[in-house]
Amino acid sequence: MTDPTYLTWLYVPGDRPGVVAKALGSGADVVLVDLEDAVAPDRKGYALDATADLLADKHEVPVHVRVNALDGPLAEQEVRRLTPLPGLDALRLPKVGGPDDIARVLDWAVEVPPLYALLESALGIEHAYTIADHAAVHGIALGEADLRAELGVTDARGLAWPRGRAVVAALAARLPPPPQSVYPDVRDTEGLARSCAEGRALGFLGRTAIHPRQLPVIEEAFLPTEVEVAAAHEIVRAAAADAGALALPDGRFVDAAVVADARRVLALAERRS
């Protein structure tokens, strides 16, 4: 299971081991080594070799690897080669359309790591819950660039339903809230902060990044405010005094789900210390 306090995932190209090494010291909660979109076709073999070398040892920062398309010629070899390695903490699976794609990866895996499914198609959105509910899946996320292209979406409003669907599917399957998809303009930190605030309001938790300068902006956007922390402390104190449903002094009704959310807020707040 993903640590519930993870907020930042940093994508790095698998064919640039020097950049990967820097990413491990960037402060990202998870480093995502990409063998797919970030690597040119003639560099795929080198990227796999370099990533296998990296994963020969365990790292302090969790390392996830995004393999190539599951229906293409490369993914099987990548899964078979990488899954026995001690430094692999999880696989990211692109363009998952349904549970059959997960089963295919399980057939290839020498050892089964946690799997994270990227929903990047209309079919993947339709099957969001059955994908999230698979026993081998530890998290889901949207791949919004490909999803926009397939849906013909020209305005962010067109992604409102897929975004909500991903959040609901993850929580219904008892997974952590999904992180937001990448914000492509690495210089526009103000726009990134606004976008993160919108994503947080929709139920996302944290975000994938494509440059280290995005990491502190993402973290700050998803950390609770002082007001939220104070409210969470009040709820947890009240729950400790009464194990059942209860009403706070201001009249708000508190049940188990509210208490669980308050504890998550306090866990996130510890990152500031």
Image (tube, rainbow, N blue to C red):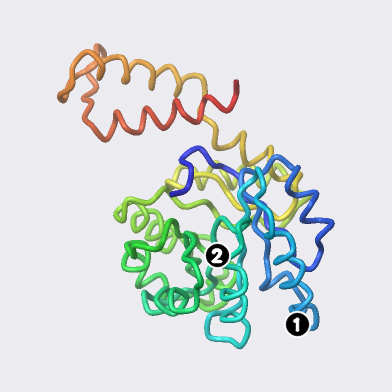
Residue 217 x %, y %: 67, 39
Query: Quick one: 136 or 253, which is closer to the camera?
Result: 136
Residue drawn where x is 42% and y is 64% of the image: 162
Disc 2: which residue: 92
Establish if 58 lies above or below 115: above
Residue drawn where x is 69% and y is 60% of the image: 56
Residue drawn where x is 31% and y is 20% of the image: 235
Residue 211 x %, y %: 75, 51
Kindly state the secondary structure of the residue where label 2 is placed.
strand
Establish if 102 lies above or below 71: above
Residue 185 x %, y %: 73, 55
Residue 238 x %, y %: 26, 15
Q: Which amino acid does label 1 sit on?
A: Pro
Query: Quick one: 155 or 159, which is closer to the camera?
Result: 159
| Residue 181, numbered label | none
Q: In which quarter of the image is the C terminus?
A: top right
What whole-number distance in Å separates the C-alpha atoms at marks 2 and 1? Answer: 19 Å
| Residue 41, numbered label | 1
Residue positioned most to the left: 244
Q: What residue type is labelled 2?
A: Arg
